Image (spheres, helix red, strand yellow):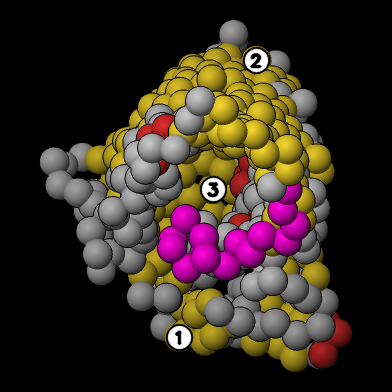
C-alpha cells in the first residue's frame, strides 16, 4: 500500500497489484458456464484508492480504481470501480475483444462500454446489474455454427453475406431480464424488447417479447438448399412484427412485403403485401399483389409418425392467369381428402425445387395421412431435367396415382410430332433411380434410349442421354 495516512480513526491509501489470479472467481462460479478463460488468466494491473475506519465493521470500507483484466485475452479495461458498503459499481471498456477467445462458436470482435453494479454478497448473474452498448464487427453467430444444427434442406452458408454485417446493441440487465433497447445492423435488421431469463432452468430463456424489423433482405440468400442447376428465388423482403413465446416455442407475427419476386424465372406482381404468422406448430401466410397475384398458405405440424412434418390445410397461388387452389374437404387433420385444382400453372415456379417446366392443368386429390396423390393432369410443352439429360415432348395427359413409392400411370397420352399416342392400363413396374414406374406394353408407344440402343416396351429406362421417340410397331 502506498501513501497510507491515518487521522482521527480514519485511514486511506493506494493499493497497486499485478497478476491477480482469476482462478478463484472461476471456481466460485462467478464466470458463467461455457465462457472459456485460460487457467493462468489474471488481472494484469489493478490500482485502488481505499479508505475506511479502525472499526472492524467491513461496511466502513470503501474503494475505487481501475483494472486491466485477463492476460491471454485482448485487454478490456475496467475503470471507475467503486466499492462502498459491500456494493460494487464500475465501467468496463472492451477494445476489439475477439469473441472466439471467450466462446469458440462466436466470431468477430467486440467493442463495448458497460456500467455495472452489484454486491459482494451476490456475484451471480442475478445479483449483477449492467447497461451499456455492444458493437460487434460481425453478427457473432457464424454459418459454421448454424450448420451443426443439421436442419433438413438448411443451407446456412447462404447467410454469410448477411452475417458479415456489423451489429450494435444497446442493452440493460436487471438480474432477471435482458432489455434490448435497440439492436441494429447495416443489413437492415432492427430489434427492441425484452428477453426473460431464469438461470435455474436447463434452457435459461423463459420469455420473448421483441419488436423485429427487417428491410431489403435479399431473397437469394435464403438458407434453403437447392439443386445445383436450380434458379434461386430473387427479390427483396421487408418485415415488421413481433417475436413472442419462449426459446422452445417461439412465435412470430407481422406484416410482410415482397418486392420484385421472381421464382424459377417467373415474375410476380412488383409488390406483394400481407401478413405472416408462424410457430413450431403452424404457418399462415397471405400475400396479395396489386393485380391478381396471390400467395396464401395455411399449414400445421402433423402428429408424430406422420409421413410429412407439416401438411397444408389450404393453399392458393395465383400468378396472372395461373391458379393453384386447394383445401381440405373434411374436418380431419392431417387431411385425407385435400382437393387441389390447377389451371395454367407454370411449372417453372417449381424449378427451385424440381427441375421441370411446362404448363400444368390438373385436378388432384391428396391424402396427407398416407402420402397418396391421385388425379388427372395435362402438361403442355413438358420438360424435365433428369440426371442423364433433358426429357421433353409437345404435351402429355395422364391419370395417375402415387403411393408407397410407386407411380402408376393410366390413360396416358403423349403428343409428339403432331400425333397423339395412347397407352393401355398398367401391367408392369420397374425402378428408375428412386422412382418406380408402372407402365404397359402398347402397340403404338415405345421408349427408345438412343445412346445405349435399348428399346423397352415396359419401362421408362435411364440409359445414356434419355430421349423419347415415338415408334410405330
Residue 125 badge: none
The residue drawn where x is 73% and y is 48% is 16
User: Which residue is under mark 2?
Assistant: 271
**Which is more toward the observer, 310 or 265?**
310
Label 1, label 2: how far apart the Cα atoms are: 49 Å
Quick check: 249 above or below 23?
above
Label 2, label 3: how far apart the Cα atoms are: 31 Å
Magenta stretch: give its range.
16-30
Q: Determine whether the residue tagged by mark 3 lies in a helix, strand or loop.
A: strand
**Which is more toward the observer, 235 or 390?**
235
Question: Going by the picture, which residue comes out furthest to the right?
Answer: 451
The location of residue 36, given as percent across then percent down, is 61, 65
Quick check: 272 above or below 94?
above
The location of residue 213, given as percent across then percent down, is 57, 21
User: Which residue is under mark 1?
Assistant: 428
Q: Determine whether the residue tagged by mark 2 lies in a helix, strand or loop.
A: strand
Q: Earlier in the sequence, mark 2 or mark 3?
A: 2
The residue drawn where x is 25% and y is 40% is 328
The residue drawn where x is 46% and y is 26% is 179
Question: Going by the picture, which residue comes out furthest to the front?
Answer: 8
Q: Quadrant of the C terminus?
A: bottom right
Q: Earlier in the sequence, mark 1 or mark 2?
A: 2
Left or right: where does residue 247 sit relative to residue 12?
A: left
Quick check: 24 above or below 141?
below
User: Which residue is under mark 3?
Assistant: 378
Q: Determine whether the residue tagged by mark 1 lies in a helix, strand or loop.
A: strand
- Counting other residues with Cα less than 10 Å from the Cα at mark 1, is it few (<14), some (14-19), or many (20 or more)? some
Q: Cβ–Cβ below 8 Å for labels 2 and 3?
A: no
**Which is more toward the observer, 435 or 358?**
435
- Queried whether the magenta region covers residue 386, the answer comes back as no
**Which is more toward the observer, 373 or 75?**
75
Q: Earlier in the sequence, mark 3 or mark 1?
A: 3
Amino acid at each position: 500500500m502506498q501513501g497510507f495516512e491515518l487521522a482521527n480513526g480514519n485511514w486511506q491509501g493506494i493499493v497497486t497489484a499485478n497478476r491477480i489470479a482469476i482462478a478463484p472467481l472461476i471456481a466460485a462460479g462467478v464466470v458463467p458456464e461455457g465462457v472459456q478463460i485460460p487457467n493462468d488468466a489474471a488481472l494484469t494491473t489493478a490500482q485502488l484508492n481505499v479508505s475506511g475506519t479502525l472499526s472492524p465493521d467491513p461496511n466502513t470500507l470503501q474503494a475505487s480504481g481501475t483494472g486491466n483484466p485477463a492476460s491471454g485475452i485482448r485487454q478490456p479495461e475496467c475503470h471507475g470501480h467503486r466499492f462502498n458498503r459491500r456494493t460494487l459499481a464500475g465501467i468496463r471498456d472492451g477494445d476489439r475483444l475477439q469473441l472466439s477467445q471467450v466462446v469458440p462458436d462466436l466470431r468477430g470482435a467486440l467493442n463495448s462500454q458497460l456500467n455495472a453494479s452489484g454486491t459482494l454478497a451476490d456475484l451471480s448473474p442475478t445479483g449483477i446489474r449492467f447497461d451499456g452498448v455492444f458493437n460487434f464487427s460481425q453478427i457473432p453467430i457464424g454459418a459454421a455454427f448454424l450448420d451443426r444444427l443439421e436442419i433438413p434442406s438448411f443451407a446456412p452458408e447462404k447467410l454469410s453475406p448477411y452475417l458479415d454485417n456489423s451489429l450494435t446493441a444497446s442493452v440493460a440487465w436487471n438480474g432477471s431480464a435482458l432489455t434490448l433497447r435497440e439492436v441494429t445492423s447495416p443489413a437492415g435488421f432492427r430489434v427492441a424488447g425484452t428477453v426473460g431469463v431464469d438461470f435455474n432452468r436447463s434452457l435459461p430463456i423463459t420469455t420473448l417479447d421483441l419488436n423485429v424489423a427487417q428491410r431489403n433482405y435479399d431473397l437469394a440468400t435464403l438458407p434453403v438448399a437447392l439443386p445445383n442447376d436450380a434458379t434461386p428465388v430473387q427479390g427483396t423482403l421487408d418485415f415488421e412484427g413481433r417475436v413472442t413465446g419462449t426459446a422452445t416455442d417461439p412465435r412470430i407475427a407481422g406484416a410482410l412485403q415482397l418486392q420484385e419476386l421472381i421464382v424459377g424465372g417467373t415474375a410476380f406482381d412488383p409488390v406483394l403485401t400481407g401478413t405472416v404468422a408462424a410457430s413450431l406448430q403452424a404457418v399462415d401466410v397471405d400475400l396479395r399483389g396489386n393485380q391478381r397475384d396471390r400467395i396464401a398458405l395455411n399449414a400445421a405440424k402433423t402428429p408424430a409418425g406422420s409421413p410429412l412434418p407439416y401438411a397444408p390445410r389450404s393453399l392458393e397461388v395465383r400468378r396472372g392467369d395461373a391458379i393453384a387452389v386447394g383445401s381440405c374437404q373434411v374436418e380431419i387433420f392431417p387431411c385425407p381428402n385435400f382437393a387441389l385444382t390447377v389451371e395454367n400453372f407454370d411449372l417453372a415456379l417449381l424449378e427451385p425445387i424440381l427441375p421441370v417446366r411446362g404448363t400444368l392443368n390438373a385436378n388432384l386429390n391428396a391424402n396427407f395421412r398416407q402420402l397418396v396423390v391421385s388425379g388427372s393432369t395435362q402438361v403442355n410443352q413438358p420438360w424435365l431435367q433428369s440426371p442423364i439429360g433433358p426429357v421433353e415432348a409437345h404435351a402429355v395427359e395422364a391419370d395417375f396415382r402415387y403411393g408407397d413409392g410407386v407411380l402408376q400411370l393410366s390413360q396416358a397420352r403423349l403428343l409428339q410430332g403432331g400425333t397423339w399416342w395412347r397407352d393401355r392400363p398398367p401391367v408392369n413396374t420397374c425402378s428408375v433411380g428412386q422412382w418406380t414406374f408402372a407402365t404397359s406394353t402398347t402397340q403404338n408407344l415405345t421408349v427408345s434410349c438412343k445412346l445405349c440402343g435399348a428399346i423397352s416396351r415396359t419401362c421408362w429406362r435411364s440409359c445414356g442421354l434419355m430421349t423419347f421417340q415415338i415408334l410405330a410397331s
